[in-house]
Amino acid sequence: MSRRGLLFAGLVGLLSGVVAVPVAAADPAYVLKDGVTQPVFSFADAIRETVWVDIGLDLDNNGVGDRVAADIIRPATAAKVPVIIDASPYYQSAGRGNESEIKSYDSAGTPVKFPLFYDNYFVPRGYAVTLIDFSGSNRSTGCMDTGGRSEIASGKAVIDWLNGRATGYSAASGGTTVAASWSTGAAAMIGKSWDGSITQGVAATGVDGLKTIVPISAISSWYDWFRSDGVSLNGFGTPTSLASGFENANARSRCAAVRNEMTAGATSNGDFTPMWAQRDFVQNAGQVKAAVFSVNGAFDLNVKPINWGQWLAALPASVPRKLWLSQTGHVDPFDFRRATWVPTLNKWFDRWLLGIQNGIENEPAVSVERSPDVWTDTQTWPPSGTQLQTVYPNAGSVAGVGTLTSLPGTGSAAFTDNGSATPSNVITSPNATSSRRIIYSTNTLTSDLRIAGISKITVTASPSTATAHLSAFLVDYGPATIRSTTGEGIRTLTTESCWGEDRPGDDACYKNTVPTVSNVDAHVFSRGWADLANFSSLSTPRTLTPGTKYTMTFRLSTTDHIVPKGHRLAIVIAGTDSTMIPAPAQLPRLTVDLARTALQIPAVGTPAQEATTAPIPAPANLEPDTYPASLDNRN
């Protein structure tokens, strides 16, 4: 559209709500409607190119700086435009999105297919989209180091290049220098899972030019993807084993030193090592300047919810933020709330990349799915009125079954770790003694109880052997309709909806989804796992002496869950959760000192009730256990 046409559109917009706004003096007028940019730039004529950016490292030790391939598509305009970046190791392997899209190139090596809808939708609205191959993957050189400095540099160096602080080239080796003269320097990073993790790692460097990040089901500390409070997680392996599935030929042949470093730092006993510390983005979250839009699944057992909670808690108060929390597992919002997600993302990018004062930062910051496709909004997170409250297990008349009250309990309770406990078999029959767990619950709640944040449990226990693992579950006892764990909470349809414009080799249409739904009488909404040998330090385990009491505090997954009036909140303590952690070398019987055991929950409302003898209605309907290690789609 010509400038004359844009001016005419602005005049007509006085009546229609469509206005042409000059965002900056050097920029074209972007057409806005209801505060968001509209598609006025030609997608068919968009410029497509690849630039290889030097990341300032030589991890493949070939004497040449490592370069990451940045595939770029941008409007064919003389004006400068901002950039949306998705850096990933998956572009020629597992693919991206629910339909596992991969990049494609023409015979000259020019990018043709850009996975996901970002290019189709945002390039016509005046944005460039850049898809980066992690170092050591696809067309990049260097090594894959799973959350390490090379991956962080993969994203940071491209932002530096967009701002004239790093060097780009026309080829993976040699070539001529290429400048990003078309860029405003303003960048966003977005991505799900591994891609999303790097958005947080780059943001934690405080790099200038990064205006916002959109981490989706993102890892904030790689220790908390592979491990949990001293114990390894089943099937998650090591950083080395993960990277091996996505390395290119150069990385496989030249990066043994990097692989050996990761392997040495990922001890099988689950201890926290300096290798994990390098991959902990939370510790540097205080340097974040970019606005954060965090999207997560409450029932995600791939990227456990502890990751998003600790990340948001560590951000400076000055950082604008937004949070979506669905009932799904490891799912992109494009596949669980598409019709709301796309325009919301459009408005978010317009605000932080173009400086359009559309007021999105003043809207409710939090949107939580309370039942399938039913969302509630609150202004802040944690919600106003949240207080850290402590409740204690008290023994009842049935061994291993009791109440949660405001006063410490007395006596002890015991269970035997047989190595086969699962969430479903420890929450069933809540009124009866079980050899594999102990359970304590509130009275029937007289008002809603909202638990929002990271709960912690302190357990004092004496093992009968020299090794012991612990698992803990927060359970909502009462009827509810929730997203099923089947298909991570979605079912993919054969119908499609289209988001953006098409061009040959790159269409904008994607299969629709609907929720998978379960009616349950009880469900686990937060959980955690630990190795009792790490009772005093995650980095230094201690040998346990049978019969000796040890006190350990460990974390439960981040949640924002309402236990409704008429339901009960329960804490279940067990040994090995066989769906998530391995059994210890010697299976123990554990005796828990109730006087020195407590649960801390961040809550709005009062969980502690007077003790009651009324039994919990036995749940007839439970969700089947999920074994994350068997999931096909780990990205």
Image: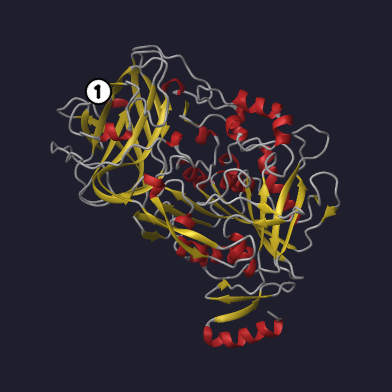
Is residue 382 rendered to the left or right of residue 94? left
The total number of labels drawn is 1
- The residue tagged with tag 1: helix, strand or loop? loop
- Residue at the extreme front: 107
Q: Nearer the viewer, residue 126 or 503?
A: 503
Residue 61 point in image, percent of width and height? 78, 32
Please tell me in which quadrant of the rendered image residue 503 appears: bottom right
- The quarter of the displayed image where residue 185 is located: bottom right
Q: Foreground residue, 114 or 272? A: 114
Residue located at (71% from left, 51% from top): 70
**Relative to 97, is 25 on the left or the right?**
right
The residue identified by callout 1 is 435
| Image side of residue 484 versus residue 48, left or right | left
In the figure, 588 relative to 351: above or below? Answer: above
Image coords of residue 44 (percent x, y): 67, 69
Nearest the camera: 247 or 10? 247
Disc 1 residue crowd, few under 14, some 14–19, many 20+, Cα 10 Å: some
| Residue 432 drawn above or below residue 310 | above
Of residue 49 and residue 509, the one placed in the foreground of this image is: 509
Colour scheme of the picture: secondary structure
* Res 449 visible: no
Asked whether the viewer can see residue 359, the reply is yes
- Whole-percent x, y for residue 438 in the image: 26, 28
Q: Residue at x 70, y 63 (%)?
A: 74
Tell whether 182 sits left or right of 457. right
Q: Quarter of the image containing the N terminus? A: bottom right
- Disc 1 residue type (three-letter): Ser
